[in-house]
Image (spheres, helix red, strand yellow):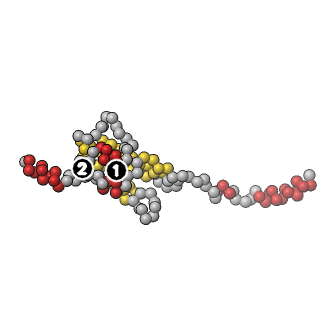
């Protein structure tokens, strides 16, 4: 009984200390989902590439819709442990199993800092090769 009375002032002093949980926060992991497509990968795309060649460059598409067989969608989502969610999309269009155009977000990647890429929404059109344009003019 006397021991409890001796510990009582020490226990009362502990009640005025700030809570440690106010200063500690749990660790949250970065979550990356989908296809990470870099600007270098997009630069390798040329009109007339086959589906297999596009799959080799970009990887398998995240979305290959059976109702839009001539279109592949590449979606990338990055959710950092703290901060804003970032999402990028890129769509590849085919005609007669040949690449015709690419549309979507262009990557402005910060490779030197190692930070997540910042997407900027722009449409990327693949120009036709010069020989195809000359052939089209000769046919006219």
Q: Could you tell me residue 85's position as x and y percent? A: 46, 51
- The picture places residue 49, in percent across and down from the top left corner, at 26, 47
Q: Residues within 10 Å of mark 2 (few under 14, many from 20)?
A: some
Furthest residue in direction bottom, as rendered: 112
Q: Are marks 1 and 2 in contact (CB under 8 Å)?
A: no
- Circle count: 2
Please tell me which residue lies in front, 27 or 10: 27
Between disc 1 and disc 2, the foreground one is 1
Q: Where in the figure is residue 19, as x and y percent of width and height?
A: 69, 56
Q: Is residue 91 visible?
A: no
CA gap, disc 1 and disc 2: 13 Å
Q: Which residue is found at the position 54% from the left and 52% from the top?
A: 29
Q: Residues within 10 Å of mark 1 (few under 14, many from 20)?
A: some
Residue appearing at x 12%, y 49% in the figure: 136
Of the two numbered discs 1 and 2 on the same chain, state the one appearing first in sequence. 2
- Is residue 14 visible in the rendered image? The answer is yes
Which label was assigned to residue 132? none
Camera-nearest residue between 9 and 57 = 57
Judge by depth and name the residue closer to the eye, 92 or 13: 92
Q: Position of residue 112 (x, y in %)?
A: 43, 65
Q: Residue at x 41, y 62 (%)?
A: 110
Residue at the image point whose x is 45% and y is 47% from the top: 33
Q: Secondary structure at mark 2?
A: loop
* Badge number at residue 47: 2
Extreme-right residue of the structure: 2
Element marked by disc 1: helix
Residue named by callout 1 = 57
In the image, taking residue 93 as reference, residue 115 lies left or right, namely: right
């Amino acid at each position: 009984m006397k021991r409890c009375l001796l510990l009582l002032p020490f226990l009362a002093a502990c009640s005025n200390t700030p809570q440690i949980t106010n200063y500690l926060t749990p660790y949250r992991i970065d979550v990356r989902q989908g296809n990470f497509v870099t600007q270098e990968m997009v630069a390798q795309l040329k009109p007339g590439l086959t589906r297999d060649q596009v799959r080799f460059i970009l990887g398998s598409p995240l979305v290959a819709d059976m109702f839009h067989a001539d279109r592949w969608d590449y979606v990338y989502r990055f959710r950092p442990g703290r901060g804003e969610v970032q999402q990028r999309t890129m769509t590849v269009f085919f005609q007669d199993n040949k690449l015709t155009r690419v549309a979507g977000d262009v990557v402005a990647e910060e490779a030197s800092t190692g930070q997540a890429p910042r997407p900027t929404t722009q449409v990327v059109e693949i120009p036709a090769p010069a020989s195809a344009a000359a052939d089209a003019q000769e046919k006219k």
